[in-house]
Structure formats: structure tokens, C-alpha cells
Amino acid sequence: MIFLLAGIAILLWVGSVACWVMTLIKMFKSETTGIAVLGILCGLWAFIWGWKNAEKQNHQQIMKIWTGLMIGAIVINVIVTAMSASMTSS
């Protein structure tokens, strides 16, 4: 069961990376290069920029998906961590 959940977490991570890249593309098209490079170096900055400019850049759907993927990944990783901790302690 842990391996299935870990696989789902990996898929969620891949989806998050895809949303991050789409946000970076929007950043490079509309901002200075320095701001966009900062988005490469710090994914949190790209996430914040994406939400701040979601309506202006017509990027709301991608940001909603990215947020859902991140929340899902956090939940799955907490579950996997709890399950693996309970397996090693018994």
C-alpha cells in the first residue's frame, strides 16, 4: 500500500513540475528576465507570482490545478510517512 501511495505522490510531483514550467513560460513572456530566473531558482516565488498574476495572465486554471496537486502531495506524503513509521516501530 505504501508503494502505491508513493507512486501517486510521484505522479502529483510530476504534475506540479508541469504547472511550474507553464508558469515559468508565462513569466518569461510577461516579466523581465531577472524575475523569471528567480522563478526558476525558487519555485515558491513562481507559485506566488502565478497567483498574483493569474487573472491578468489568464492562468487561473493552471494555478488551481497546481494548488490542488501540492495539497494532494502533502496529504499523501504525510500518510506515507505515518504508515512507514508505524511499520518500523512494530
Image (cartoon, rainbow, N blue to C red):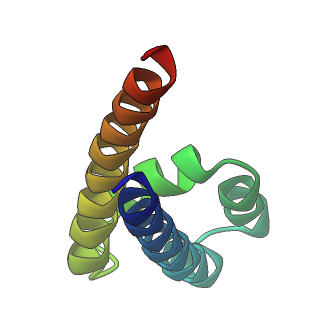
User: Horizontal and vertical percent for residue 5?
Assistant: 36, 58
- Closest to the observer, 3 or 14: 3
Examine the rendered structure and indicate whether residue 31 appears above or below residue 26: above
Location of the C terminus by quadrant is top left
The residue at the point 32 percent across, 62 percent down is 69
Q: Is residue 1 left or right of residue 28?
A: left
Q: Residue at coordinates 27% horizontally, 54% vertically from top-left?
A: 72
The answer to which quarter of the image holds residue 47 is bottom left
Dividing the image into 4 quarters, which one contains the N terminus? bottom left
Residue 35: x percent and y percent? 68, 57
Residue 82, horizontal then vertical, whole percent: 36, 28
Vertical side of 51 occupied by 18: above or below: below
* Residue found at the far front of this picture: 90
Please tell me how many numbered marks the rendered image carries.
0
Instruction: Give how far across and how far down residue 13 sits, in percent.
Output: 49, 64
Q: Residue at x 43, y 29 (%)?
A: 87
Q: In the rendered image of this protein, does residue 89 appear above or below residue 62?
A: above
> Would residue 4 appear left or right of 67 to someone viewing this image?
right
Q: Is residue 71 above or below residue 15?
A: above
Residue 13 as seen in the image, left or right of residue 25:
left
| Nearer-the-camera pick, 73 or 60 | 73
Give the residue displayed 50% in from the left and 82% down from the top.
22
On the image, which quarter does residue 83 sit in? Answer: top left
